[in-house]
Amino acid sequence: MRPELLNPLFAEVTALKGIGPQLTKPLDRLGLARVVDVLFHLPTGWIDRLARDELDIADAGRVIAITLTPVSYRFGGSARAPARVQAVDAAGNYVSLVYFGGNSGWVKKLFPLNEPRRVSGKLESYGQELQIVHPDHVQPLDGGEPLAEREAIYPLSEGMTSKRLAGLAAQALERAPELPEWIEPGLKARHGWPDWHEALARIHADPADAKARERLAYDEVFANQLALLLVRGEARAKRGRPLIGDGRLREALRLPYAATGAQARTIGEIEGDLRQSQPMLRLLQGDVGSGKTLVATMTLLMAAEAGTQGALLAPTEILARQHFENLSRMLAGIDVRIAILTGRDKGRVREATLMGLADGSIDILIGTHAIFQEGVTYRDLGLVVVDEQHRFGVAQRMLLQAKAARPPHLLVMTATPIPRTLTLAQYGEMDVSRLDEMPPGRQPIETRVIAEDRLGDVADALARHLEGGGQAYWVCPLVEESEKSDLAAAEARAEALRARFGDKVGLVHGRMKGPEKDAVMARFSAGQLGVLVATTVIEVGVDVPNATLIVIEAADRFGLAQLHQLRGRVGRGGGRSVCLLLRGNQLNETSRARLALMRETNDGFRIAEEDLRLRGAGELLGTRQSGEMQFRLANPEMLGELLPAANGDARLLIDRDGGLKGERGRAARLALYLFERDAAVGLLRSG
């Protein structure tokens, strides 16, 4: 249970004064549902306001604060014409105060003639005169607080201003208690960091305060590292049981290829883990096409050889069914029973699967999150394999592990290569294996960047590709925050392609029902469709070796990791594959750098490191699949700098300073709750 001391911060945001229906929506859009969200919504920039007695053209382009006296009005003849107030400074210099769409009555009320006002805004030179467009502050000389020389600028949404957010942050700060110190005193002194409460007050008052910002980022990284160490410690303390296979099922597996060195090394590491009584906690990173499926299959066979059951958890129904088909094909003729369970399975089929799990006649279960629902029981679950790890949180992993009488061994896999910095930040409790070697015969995918105004040439190239018997994906633009817009783009593109290619064109998107989506995918896999138009629903789990061309529209809107995942839908057979990235005509430097790197390399690990540098940790895994990597206060540069110190400090707390039971540990417990890392540490609830 959360300590009472923190309850004022976890109250709903409506507990702050002045929040009515008008403010609720913009706050909701910003994700500010609780007081603590406002407190941690830090300013990202600031306005430096120059106090001036007289107007000076040398100040053009800067924000000034000056006393002005309105002397006349100039209103246009139409409602659209700007409203202008002519005003003078103490020396009689003129300036126009301009309001577009300004109501004349409202402007006259704001600026009564011959009554001085303190005005702040950006001074501009317009022809032969000076002007301030939409001043940010206007107040009588005897009214309100003096204007701050530095004003914080916050991330905003429509209907919200920085001034209003600063007021809410001030209220949130008043509710924030003084908390005991959780940072090791020597470390805090070396860095010159302020106390937690002081750091918050300083950063909201002065966004340029580097020490305050660094202190708050460190707190978040420290809480993250401590939570991961506690999870690891708890897992290591639990007694599982060794799974020692006799090799009979693996020897019966007849593969048409030999394992790569990286696969053999990883399988050996996993076999060593399974032989221990401590439950395995291993992360398997493998680039697209590096052969994670073989490693997962061998691991599941080891569990079956040892007489226990294995479960493979996939994030989507498409991926679950594909795993089921692949494993059924690979393990045909071997004495092992495989089943699948998804949210779609109902009636007798579902009942038969549940009975088989309960009586132990099913050795390997593959499915979506349905496999850890309440009604699903296992006779003897010894191993859990989680695919596309970033789609699942720690809490979901723990739910599945709770299905076993004794803690099962856990292997989590991701095809999204993760930079080493973030591996430590997100998976610090796990041992890590990397498949950094491609199976022989895999050809690199040729990637080209093409301007979107050459769409006709791309359609001609697609026609030639289809005539040659090939198949292709056509991925439609990612439209931020709008699945409906994504869908509209895909439907429009499918319609345009059908006008040329007829019924060879299929469409899949996230809003389709499972059976409908499966039917389209089955037709594409069987070669009945030549072109599959899709939203990013095809990002993982689609494996059609004959599809050797992928077109990604508006590629400059995607992050590197997502582009790399999408590109990985081709290059799955022995033939040459091509990825065409269609770009807009107005590219910023970041988009240009992303597309250049995609053209230059197929190395997912290099792409991941560059993605972190260009985009940042919060976006690394794509906007639609953020997973549990959420740092609100620590940016990527800070993560790299602060992680080693935070990891060392967390270890020191556990090893030397009495863990959570000592004085510093009790303070650190508050940090875990404050930064909401308690959900990953079930042991906190019991002590």
Image: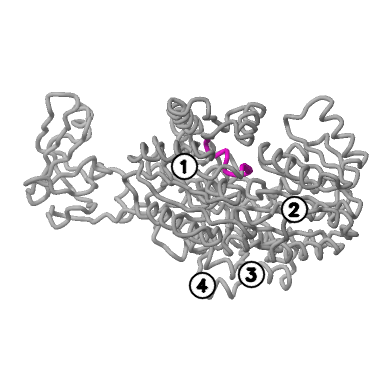
Q: Which residue is mark 4?
A: 191
Q: Which residue is mark 3?
A: 649
Query: Gap between marks 4 and 2, in whole Å?
Result: 45 Å
Q: Nearer the viewer, residue 478 or 404?
A: 478
Q: Which amino acid type corresponds to the residue marked 3 in the rendered image?
A: Asp
Q: Secondary structure at mark 2?
A: helix
Quarter where residue 457 is shown: top left
Query: Gap between marks 2 and 1, in whole Å?
Result: 30 Å
Q: Residue at x 33, y 55 (%)?
A: 150
* Residue 667, percent from left and from top: 66, 61
* Residue 486, percent from left and from top: 48, 33
Q: Which amino acid type corresponds to the residue marked 1 in the rendered image?
A: Val
Q: Which amino acid type corresponds to the residue marked 4 in the rendered image?
A: His
Left or right of residue 23: residue 605? right
Q: Is residue 17 magenta?
A: no
Residue 551 disc label: 1
Query: Gap between marks 1 and 3, in whole Å?
Result: 48 Å
- Tags 3 and 2 touching, CB below 8 Å: no
